[in-house]
Image: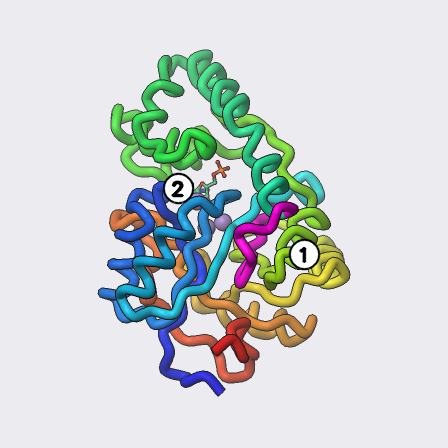
Amino acid sequence: MPSPLLNVDLHCHSTISDGVLAPADVAARAAANGVDVWALTDHDEIRGIAQARAAALDLGMRYVTGVEISVTWAARTIHIVGLNIDETNDDLLAGLAMTRSGRQRRAEDMAADLAKAGIPNVYQGALKYVGNPDLISRSHFARYLVEIGVCENVSAVFKKFLTEGKPGFVPHRWATLAEAVGWIRRSGGVAVVAHPGRYDLSPIAFDAFFREFKAYGGSAIEVVTGSHTVDQYLEYTKVANQYGFMGSRGSDFHSPDDTSADLGRLPSLAKELKPVWDGWF
Ligand code: AMP
Ligand code: MN
Ligand code: MN
Ligand code: MN
């Protein structure tokens, strides 16, 4: 049995996607915050893993390979985390490349939309914040719009501009749920629903989603995440047990300026939950 005192953080981002710290700097911050078991889970990218793993092992942390895959399900964006994947698996690599491929065009369309709304040159501006040219994200746009004083903070930008129905929002089709879970499973990994409390789904749609996820071979959901309230920790503990899912814990750290959880700074999983990392070490 793993020690209940282990500090496990299985969700965060680096400059390889939309985080602001390089993989080795995320590792250093995790270690400084007391994380024992750590995964970097960049959006649709595994190119930070080698650097993250080397830094983690140097710092005495246990390292878990990870990725957060963007999925479109029922016209909504859902994130699926893959843990313990083989990041050299060809099927996974091809799938991630395909998932990333529309981002460039989407970014140009977002900038065109924002220009029409009276904010020019946002594409060039956002690029200053992009660490990986294959992974331009709404977060980079948001940071630039804060920089030029359009909004006071990133979450205000999302509210006013980058979400459905707002200028700057461009609908996008990501991977399917079957594809994402399939790539994760076929590369030896475990598929985990990221921050389920963030999705705007009816109870009926949620039920259909969890059943479908399970049917494809998904086996865990995030319960303790920086995106959940304390009430949602309880709610998703019940949901996990109802569907027979294991539970995961992760900060979803992007930046030291985040208002949500810092690396490793989250409550423990409830004892009634089977941790997704059970049996890994
Ligand atoms: P993208 O993959 O380009 O659609 O960007 C998604 C990312 O935007 C998420 O992973 C978050 O990091 C960030 N994000 C989404 N919604 C919000 C929000 N309301 N406030 C702050 N960041 C957000
Ligand atoms: Mn993100
Ligand atoms: Mn996410
Ligand atoms: Mn994330």
Q: Position of residue 244 (x, y in %)?
A: 68, 74
Examine the rendered structure and indicate whether residue 101 appears above or below residue 276.
above
Q: Residue at x 69, y 49 (%)?
A: 177
Mark 2 lies on residue = 16
| Residue 77 place in picture, x, y as percent | 60, 42
Residue 22 image offset from top left, x and y in percent = 30, 46
The local secondary structure at tag 2 comes to loop
Question: Which is more toward the observer, 188 or 203?
Answer: 188
| Residue at 40% over, 47% down | 48
Task: State how the image is colored.
Answer: rainbow
Boundaries of the magenta span: 77-91
Image quarter of residue 207:
bottom right
Inspect the image, locate mark 1, and give the three-letter code of the amino acid beneath it: Arg
Q: Is residue 255 above or below residue 210?
A: above
Q: Is residue 277 left or right of residue 119?
A: right
| 88 magenta-colored | yes
Residue under circle 1?
186
Query: Is-magenta flag for residue 90?
Result: yes
Q: Name the residue: 49% across, 44% down.
A: 45
Nearer to me, 106 or 153: 106
Regarding residue 241, the answer to whether it shows in the image is yes
Instruction: First in sequence, mark 1 or 2: give its number.
Output: 2
